[in-house]
Amino acid sequence: MDRRGVLRAGALLGAAGLAGCLGVFETRSAWRDPPIVEDRPDAPYIPASTEEMGTYGVGEAGEYTVALLYTFPHRFWTVTGTETNMVDIGDDDALHLMASVWETESETVVPADVRMTVEGRGERPYAGQLWPMLSQRMGFHYGDNLAVANEGAYTATLRINPADVRGVGGLEGSFEEARTVEIGFEYDTDDVYDLEFELVEESRRGQRGELPLMDHAEMGHGGGDGHGDHARMPHPTVPPTDEFPGEVIGTGESGGAEFVVALDDRFGGPTLVASPRTPQNRVVLPLMALSATIDRDGETVFEGALESRLDADLGVHYGAAVDPMEPGDTVRVETESPPQVARHDGYETAFFEMASIELEY
């Protein structure tokens, strides 16, 4: 399916150091042709602009809660293996629709296959699979650009297929059935154009780092039946090192990502856990392929893949059952495949050249 995409950036950034709001005409021109940082490191970096988001509504489907959000159309980069392809803003793109999916009781963000159909006003402006995505203000989510011709009432039907992770712990057996939810919304051009768009100070653009995740209280409201529900949406983050469950073996950096490696005994025996995340915001990095090796006195006592898993305490992580470890054991975590998620500005150069992480127990 031909995917169009784009970035017309912006958002309220508070103390993050922006260059100020633009007028209406300047804003429309800016998000149609947003600046791009020229000197970009192979790591998360501060992009040139940021924008506000709005909420269309929230719905529940089985064990899931789904929020539907919108902002300006965006450019973004799709990822296939280690190759990226920039998807630019189409001439007819009217907005960027986003979905966040989480397990309702634990408020744990879930990576899944999310397909969406949008219908209304005699048209079907979208029918297909949403891209799993990373953005600095939204974190991990699903999204795409839409060319909507007419203002008025629409219905988004989202089908959440079985998750790309296995539920463990209290989430064992979850995410194995497809679920469907409908969220109605009112598309009004002014709702999109009224969102705040700001440029980051030139001196900060391209510096290593991340803009802060959106405070959901900042988010604007659109025409939907979920006004006020955006406050319920959890951030797609994992625990910091000093609060990480289990016994932390150590931490490391690879390809701009931070890794926490630990042993967890909550799953019926010792489990080796690797938790990759973005460096400042601790946003989850799903859809990776990881493997691990444990060496003891010159012999390999474990070698195998780390399964993609989801736990209410650990969030998205990668793990495997291992025998009890001994002092002096060496653990090596290898990235076989980087995160297969599309990227917005600030992440499109990161998480590719990922060297192994080696730690001593």
Image (cartoon, rainbow, N blue to C red):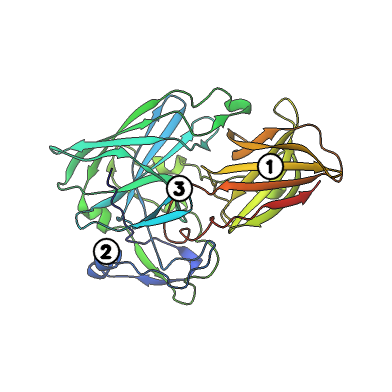
What amino acid is at disc 3? Val
Q: Nearer the viewer, residue 194 or 76?
A: 76
**Residue sitting at x 72%, y 47%:** 332
| Residue 318 location (% of width, % of height) | 62, 39
Quarter the N terminus occupies:
top left
| Residue bearing mark 3 | 341
Q: Which of 178 and 9 is in front in this view?
A: 178
What amino acid is at disc 1? Ala
Q: Distance between the residues labelled 1 and 2?
A: 44 Å
* Viewer-side label of 3, 2: 3
Q: Distance between the residues labelled 3 and 1?
A: 22 Å
| Residue 64 location (% of width, % of height) | 45, 30
**Residue sitting at x 56%, y 57%:** 353
In the rendered structure, are the residues bearing label 3 and label 1 in contact, judged by CB atoms less than 8 Å apart? Answer: no
When the figure is inspected, residue 152 is found, relative to residue 77, above or below; the finding is: above
What amino acid is at disc 2? Arg
| Residue bearing mark 2 | 32
When the figure is inspected, residue 273 is found, relative to residue 219, above or below; the finding is: above
**Residue sitting at x 52%, y 61%:** 44
Q: In this view, does 224 lie to the left or right of 10?
A: left
In the rendered structure, are the residues bearing label 1 and label 2 in contact, judged by CB atoms less than 8 Å apart? Answer: no
Question: Is residue 268 in sight in this rendering?
Answer: yes
Q: Kindly identify which numbered label has been placed on residue 292.
A: 1
